[in-house]
Image (tube, rainbow, N blue to C red):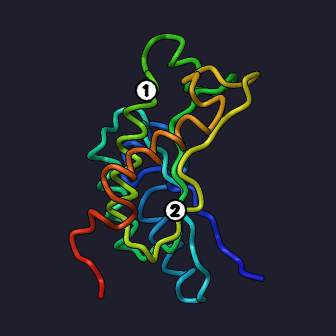
């Protein structure tokens, strides 16, 4: 049986991690991934696209950093606002807004295109139960995002097609 360690990094920007109260910084993630690599344990890192204060550029920089750190797998998630969370209160006050499906699909597509083929995508979207999901509504099902990303990859090129350095 193959064993992977999943690390919920979400962002490589310490100010974002503090803003969303993750309880860790990027250096802690880097330490964890170094330790895992020393023991030969593959790591799957979770990244959230659309965190408050972040843009597509933040997502691309986070991807580049985790790839440089040697991550072997990735899970992408859109920012979802769920009942009872601190972000729910901020969303209700109009302080944060989850991104539209088209924007998420564009960013996720480009991240996938910038990822070398040897890195495994375990997930490229996520969903939440309708009873707990406040926003965005398109996250009630993961199929709209999967279809939108699929269509964009078919048009623009698949995983690794936008890597700056192609490995032989």
Task: Give coordinates of residue 148: x percent, y percent.
Answer: 46, 39
Query: At x 45% / y 56%, what residue is drawn?
Result: 25
Pick the front one: 109 or 89: 109
Residue 21 visible somewhere in the drawing: no
Question: Which disc, if any, is residue 74?
Answer: 2
Q: Which residue has dot 1 on it?
A: 100
In the rendered structure, the answer to whether residue 52 lies left or right of residue 120 reads left
Q: Residues within 10 Å of mark 2 (few under 14, many from 20)?
A: many
In the rendered structure, the answer to whether residue 18 lies left or right of residue 84 reads left
Task: Give coordinates of residue 100: x percent, y percent.
Answer: 43, 26
- As helix, strand or loop, the secondary structure at mark 2 comes to strand
Position of the N terminus, as image quadrant, is bottom right
- As helix, strand or loop, the secondary structure at mark 1 comes to loop
Pick the front one: 121 or 52: 121
Q: Quadrant of residue 168?
A: bottom left
Task: Classify 6 as above or below 88.
Answer: below
Query: At x 43% / y 37%, what residue is drawn?
Result: 51
Q: Quadrant of residue 89?
A: top right
Q: Earlier in the sequence, mark 2 or mark 1?
A: 2
Question: Which disc, if any, is residue 123?
Answer: none
Task: Classify 10 as above or below 161.
Answer: above
């Amino acid at each position: 049986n193959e064993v992977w360690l999943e690390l919920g990094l979400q962002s490589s920007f310490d100010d974002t991690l503090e803003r969303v109260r993750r309880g860790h910084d990027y250096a802690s993630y880097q330490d964890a991934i170094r330790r895992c690599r020393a023991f030969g344990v593959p790591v799957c890192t979770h990244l959230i696209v659309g965190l408050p204060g972040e843009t597509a550029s933040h997502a691309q920089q986070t991807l580049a950093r985790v790839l440089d750190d040697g991550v072997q797998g990735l899970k992408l998630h859109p920012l979802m606002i769920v009942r009872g969370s601190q972000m729910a209160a901020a969303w209700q006050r109009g302080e944060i807004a989850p991104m539209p499906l088209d924007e998420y699909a564009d960013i996720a597509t480009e991240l996938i295109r910038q990822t070398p083929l040897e890195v495994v995508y375990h997930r490229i979207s996520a969903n939440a139960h309708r009873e707990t999901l406040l926003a965005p509504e398109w996250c009630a099902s993961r199929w709209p995002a999967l279809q939108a990303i699929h269509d964009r990859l078919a048009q623009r090129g698949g995983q690794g097609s936008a890597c700056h350095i192609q490995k032989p």
